Amino acid sequence: MTTGSVNPRRADTRRNHEAILNAAAQSLACAERVSFNHIAKQAGVGVGTVYRHFPTPESLIIAVYRRELEHLGDVVPELLERHDPEQAFRAWVTDHLAHYMMTKRGLAKALSAASSSQAELPVNAHETLVEALSSLLRANAETGNVRSDLKPETVLRGLGGLLYLDPKSDWRAETSDLLDLLWRGMRP
């Protein structure tokens, strides 16, 4: 008879997988190359474990990209449930989009190399970002925080400045400054 509990080995495998992805995302935020040794050390696993989960650097790069991208869309309903629309928008940009943009800068060359291989890239990043932003803008327009005629693509272009963030700087303050500037322009 089963109690419905997860096999400890499976849970350990999932923990290792997540730890590897987290370490790789942090590493790629600052560098464009993947070092399995460095990632293994940061994740607290052996380098063989990294290779078992991701047999090639390309597979790891694409997994990080896919995870970061999916998270940007998946987190929006949770943010809107926990916060008022303006705070949800600000939290999404500061805590999620800015991190993605910094990671993506490091991923750019690595992703370019990975996409030229046989590996399959996930869904279009632009579409995912526009959908997430549309939900946040719609919620803010319904409460009168922003103009209802805002196009998510235009706001996304304004947020493109996040690509210039340096993870070693005070990027949260710089993100806040950019958000304040954009917010004033989005007001009704």
Image (cartoon, rainbow, N blue to C red):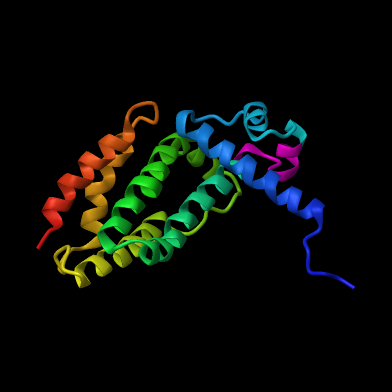
| Furthest residue in direction left, as rendered | 188
At a point 35% along the width and 53% down the height, the residue shown is: 92
Q: Quadrant of residue 181?
A: top left
Looking at the magenta stretch, what is its main secondary structure? helix
Left or right position of 180 against 18: left
Q: Position of residue 58 (x, y in %)?
A: 60, 41
Residue that appears at 55% across and 45% down: 64
Q: Position of residue 119 (x, y in %)?
A: 60, 49
The foreground one among 10 and 110 is 10
38 on left or right of 149: right
Q: Quadrant of residue 160?
A: top left
Whether residue 36 is in magenta: the answer is: no
Residue at 50 percent of width and 41 percent of height: 111
Q: Which region of the structure is painted magenta?
A: 49-58
**Quadrant of the frame with the N terminus:** bottom right
Q: Is residue 33 left or right of residue 51?
A: left
Above/below status of 124 relative to 21: below
- Choose top left, top right, bottom left or bottom right for residue 147: bottom left
Location of residue 50 with respect to 134 vertically, above or below: above
**Location of the C terminus (image quadrant):** bottom left
| Magenta stretch encompasses residue 53 | yes
In the rendered image, the residue lying farthest to the right is: 1
Q: Is residue 186 above or below residue 148?
A: above
Front-most of residues 8 and 22 = 8
Give the x, y percent position of residue 32: 49, 30
Q: Position of residue 161 (x, y in %)?
A: 26, 40
